[in-house]
Amino acid sequence: MNLIVLTPGKEIFNGDITSVKVPGINGQFEILNNHANIVSALGEGQVRIIESNGVQKTFGIQKGFVEVLKNEVSLLVQGVVE
């Protein structure tokens, strides 16, 4: 599945992944291949990405939103703390 992470100023990540864990406002949840279509608000916290090649990336975000639609995941966040 493909993930794109955007802030108002720039693109943070765009690539093929196997999973992404995000800080939902009611707790963390993980998005895997063929996840149900959703739109959800995100709170401040850590995002963990596992790329298709097995590389893991972790960074902090400020508030934002996640959208999943047909294996396309979009994270729209106010800011990133690396």
Image: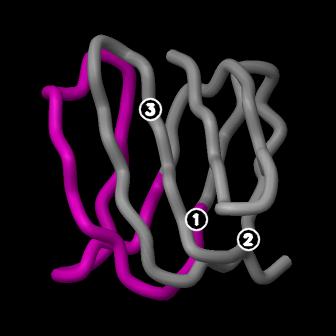
Q: Residue at x 77, y 31 (%)?
A: 54
Q: Which residue is mark 3?
A: 73
Q: Secondary structure at mark 3?
A: strand
**Does 24 sit above or below residue 62?**
above
Q: Amino acid at mark 1?
A: Val
Q: Amino acid at mark 2?
A: Phe
The mark found on residue 59 in the picture is: 2
Front tag of 2 and 3: 3
Q: Reading the chain from its start, which is encountered first: label 2 or label 3? A: 2
For the C terminus, the image quarter is bottom right
Q: Which residue is mark 1?
A: 47
Front tag of 1 and 3: 3
Q: Is residue 21 left or right of residue 48?
A: left
Nearer to me, 54 or 74: 74
Quarter of the image for residue 79 reads bottom right
Q: Which residues are magenta?
A: 21-47
Nearer to me, 39 or 24: 39
Q: Amino acid at mark 3?
A: Val
Q: Secondary structure at mark 1?
A: strand
Callout 2 environment at 10 Å: few (<14), some (14 to 19), or many (20+)?
A: few
Q: Residue at x 35, y 41 (%)?
A: 31
Q: Secondary structure at mark 2?
A: strand
Q: Residue at x 37, y 82 (%)?
A: 43
Mark 2 vs 1: CB contact within 8 A: yes
Q: Residue at x 66, y 60 (%)?
A: 7
Q: Is residue 7 magenta?
A: no
